[in-house]
Amino acid sequence: VFLFDAGYAPSAVTVQILLWYVLCFFLGCLFANILIACGKQAVDAWVSLAQVIVNVGLNLILIPVYSYNGAAAATVVGCFAGMFLTGWYAVKNSDIRLSIPWKEILNIARLNLVYLGILLILKSVIHLPLWPFLFSGIFIYALLVFSFRIFRWEQIQNYLSHWQKAPLHVENG
């Protein structure tokens, strides 16, 4: 029980299932935006319709047996179906050629696996309250981002230089 009392413990499984929805949703949005940028709105609409049909069909089957966990699973599977169909069409038929930076993606995946390991060790060894745990997690993640060279100090400085305030020009008159 992380944020709430023990009365909410049964919903933990539902949240764990729905966490996969986040991945499917954001990748699906990426692929859908590629289709829309290529003028393939009709394909995106058909994929959305297929996703709704999968979701409703699975809800009708899973909810009577698995209750809200079934609804969560149906949502994830429906979203995965939409992500898969949209991604497949975007990669195979779009006017935009996607170059996937596999080296960077694998580096970020390694970073996140190391971060997960560190958090699991910290959680089992040091029992911190929620807010110190969150702040220490953010600090550790920031350190890992720089140690895995996801960002470099020069990039951060360049980014911040664009946000420096320009002098205000006031016209008289």
Image (cartoon, rainbow, N blue to C red):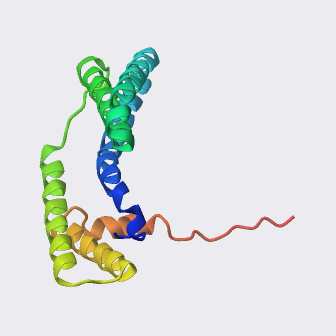
Q: Nearer the viewer, residue 103 or 66?
A: 66
Rendered position, 144 above or below 97: below
Specify whether 166 is left or right of 139: right
Q: Quadrant of the C terminus?
A: bottom right
Specify whether 98 is left or right of 158: left
Specify whether 35 is left or right of 105: right
The residue that appears at 40% across and 70% down in the rendered structure is 3
- Please state the total of marks drawn on the protein image: 0
In x, y percent, where is residue 116?
18, 65
In x, y percent, where is residue 56?
41, 25
Q: Residue furthest right?
A: 173
Q: Quadrant of the N terminus?
A: bottom left
Rendered position, 123 above or below 10: below
Quadrant of the image occupied by residue 130: bottom left
Q: Nearer the viewer, residue 139 or 102?
A: 139
Rendered position, 45 above or below 64: above
In x, y percent, where is residue 140?
24, 75
Q: Nearer the viewer, residue 135 or 78?
A: 78
The residue that appears at 37% across and 40% down in the rendered structure is 67
Q: Nearer the viewer, residue 129 or 164?
A: 129
Asked if one can make out residue 6 in the rendered structure from this viewpoint, the answer is yes
The residue that appears at 17% across and 77% down in the rendered structure is 124
Asked if one can make out residue 148 in the rendered structure from this viewpoint, the answer is no
In x, y percent, where is residue 64?
37, 32
